[in-house]
Amino acid sequence: MSDRVMWFNGSCVPWEDARVHVWDELALRGANVFEGITAFWDAAEGRHRILAGDEHLDRLFQSAHLADIPAPTTRAEVFAALAEVAGQLGGSDVYLRPTFYAKRGRSTLSLDSEGAMYIGGFPYAPSAPPAVRAIVSSHRRHGGPIGAQAKSGGSYLDFRIFERERVAAGVEHVFILNDRDQVAEADGAAILLVEEDRVTTPSVDSGVLDSITKRIVLDLARDLGHRVEERPVLRGELHRAQVVLAGTLLGLRPVQSVDGRPVDDPGGAATAAALVDGYARLCRGDHPLAARYLVPLR
């Protein structure tokens, strides 16, 4: 059995058989919104438990509304399809990516407007690279009418430019500033500045996607008794605290250097380690917040 599963047009199909026409809005104009979701295998119960499933589906449907992409199905049907994909990967943690896309119609007001969905899934086993270095991009991120409010495929086209810069610099991550020279986000992850008793992250008006993983980490920080701040963050602050990246695929990842300057905040590093441990335990159901964020996927 393949370790990659694709749900397409109502059922699971071989990965290579999931195809769309080149003239569909998905291919023609990148008209899609998506979520990245993790589901963790519970060996004792013989089933997966999905992390922040309700929050992810809330954002998926909200993104479709903001991007004017017709939602092709209901929440219950999305959950059922997620369970079908995960069920073919029993025994392992899985990454699931449900995507709503426009097949036809340049807006939902078009008479031929039609949406559709696919879900890709594969085993999830994140690992940190030997070094975690970052640079601040020389480019700036500018918003449009949709901006960072929706998790859309089109928004990620910018990341091709940031990725090229990251590879040329020979580092693992690139940080992005907005058009006001404030910190926005990293390549596919939220940025948190961790100090001994405080966790700070760029506010949503900084042009960042309101990361669900970040929300979980902020709750973990509050549970540990730390102060939490969401506000505009200046570039220089990246050099004065332990930077931690938070995202569905990479989990929590402390950064060792920014722009070649090593992180030197022992108190922040200790707090970051506690957050990393708390997040790992939450994903396994061994944390008080697990009751809020982990839901059985049937």
Image: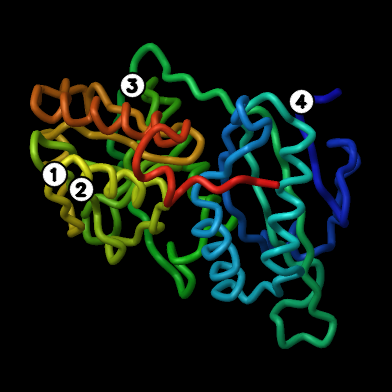
Q: Residues within 10 Å of mark 4 (few under 14, many from 20)?
A: few
In percent of width and height, residue 98 lies at: 67, 52
**Cβ atoms at labels 1 and 2 below 8 Å apart:** yes
Q: Is residue 147 left or right of residue 71?
A: left
Q: Residues within 10 Å of mark 1 (few under 14, many from 20)?
A: some
Q: Which mark is residue 222?
A: 2
Tell me the residue at 58%/72% (across/down): 67
* Above or below, 118 relative to 38: below
Disc 3 designates what residue? Answer: 132
Image quadrant holding the N terminus, namely top right
- The three-letter amino acid code for the residue at tag 3 is Val
Disc 1 designates what residue? Answer: 226
Residue extending farthest top: 130
- The three-letter amino acid code for the residue at tag 1 is His
Disc 4 designates what residue? Answer: 3
Q: Nearer the viewer, mark 4 or mark 3?
A: 4
* Above or below, 57 relative to 259: below
In percent of width and height, residue 58 lies at: 54, 65
- The three-letter amino acid code for the residue at tag 4 is Asp
